[in-house]
Amino acid sequence: MFGKHLNVYKLMRHIAKLRKRIKYWQQVGSQAVQDICQRIDKAYKLFFQQFKKGTRPPSFKKTRKYKSFTLKQAGYKFLSGNKIRIGNRVYKFSKSREIQGKVKTLTVKRNNLGELLILVVTNYVDKSFGVVTGKIAGFDYGLRTFLTASDNSAIESPLFFNSSRNRLKAASRNLSSKKKGSNNWYKAKDHLNRVYEDISNQRRDWFWKLAHDLTNKYDVLIFEDLNLDGMKRLWGRKVSDLSFATFLEILQTVAAIKGKVVHFVNRYYPSSKTCSHCGYIHQELSLKDRFWDCPSCNTKGIQRDLNASVNLQREGASSLGLDTVRLPQVASVV
Ligand SMILES: [Zn+2]
């Protein structure tokens, strides 16, 4: 009624008292409890801000539904041999990469499969961030070759792209052969979820690494502004599983951090149908033509994707007002 809620510090003090009396509250560290108070505070503030839109007030959350908690400086300690002490217990974990820099926060998270993950935020800054290379490149996106760059380098789709499609197919076939609601059906469903999660993790990992490689190599990266519907029409099958859009999102995130530019050329620009030598537009070019043979200037045998990426580079550079041969120092460190 008055738009007021319990003050976050009062709540913290209250829970600190509870912690002393009730053992159950001592399972997680004091900072994790403080973090929960801050989350509750945030949720109430958001609720009052959006009150008129009819949002519901924050409500009770079961322990099982709680997906994560965050620790700051205390309450945990990394031990040797991939072990970590959180509270009074020691846990073993497998490490995806070495931790660089000083740990600022540590979040323990449970995903939909019930797996526990440790997410670490550090103050480490990659030295390669924001290094200006003076290079600009256009990229054509394809199925077999993931990206063809205008400097004639290519990034092949990793082999797991294919194998993961087969794994997914097998798992969903397995599920549909089971009686719905039966024990085996639930098992098959869990398995399908696990395969799905594995694949998307594998892909995202690859995408992040690729995004870092490309932004280290180039200052300006030019792509065709594809919409997924158009891509589906073009290749006549479901391409959303290729998650190219996810890659572009990740690339844009990384580029923004490093002060690099990702630019999109209008999708109506005929990047495939234009000759990268003379500019002739070959309307009859079909998808089957894997090589560019120019009817006008007699250029022959340029790979179709390379021709397109060179065009994208030129078109993108000119719309940005840049010289394709030598770049002015446009990139700046954010
Ligand atoms: Zn030509």
Image (cartoon, grey):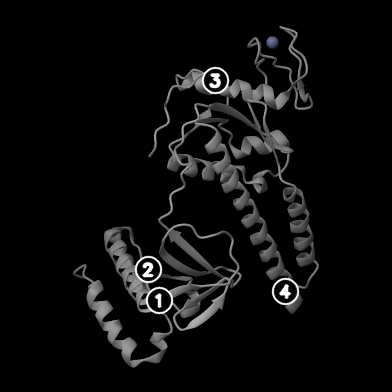
User: Residue 187 has which mark?
Assistant: 4
Q: Spatial distance from mark 4 to mark 1, Cα to Cα?
A: 36 Å
Q: Are marks 1 and 2 in contact (CB under 8 Å)?
A: yes
Q: Quadrant of ligand 1?
A: top right
User: Residue 315 has which mark?
Assistant: 3
Q: Amino acid at mark 2?
A: Lys
Which secondary structure lies at badge 4? helix
Q: Which residue is mark 2?
A: 72
Q: Disc 3 or 1, which lies upstream in sequence?
A: 1
Q: Spatial distance from mark 3 to mark 2, Cα to Cα?
A: 48 Å
Q: Position of residue 261 (x, y in %)?
A: 47, 33
238 or 220, nearer to the observer: 220
Q: Quadrant of residue 146?
A: top right
User: Residue 75 has which mark?
Assistant: 1
Q: Is residue 270 visible?
A: no
Q: Disc 2 or 4, which lies upstream in sequence?
A: 2
Q: Nearer the viewer, mark 2 or mark 4?
A: 2
Q: Amino acid at mark 4?
A: Lys
Q: Are marks 3 and 1 in contact (CB under 8 Å)?
A: no
72 or 56, nearer to the observer: 72
Q: Are marks 4 and 1 in contact (CB under 8 Å)?
A: no
Q: Position of residue 120 (x, y in %)?
A: 47, 63
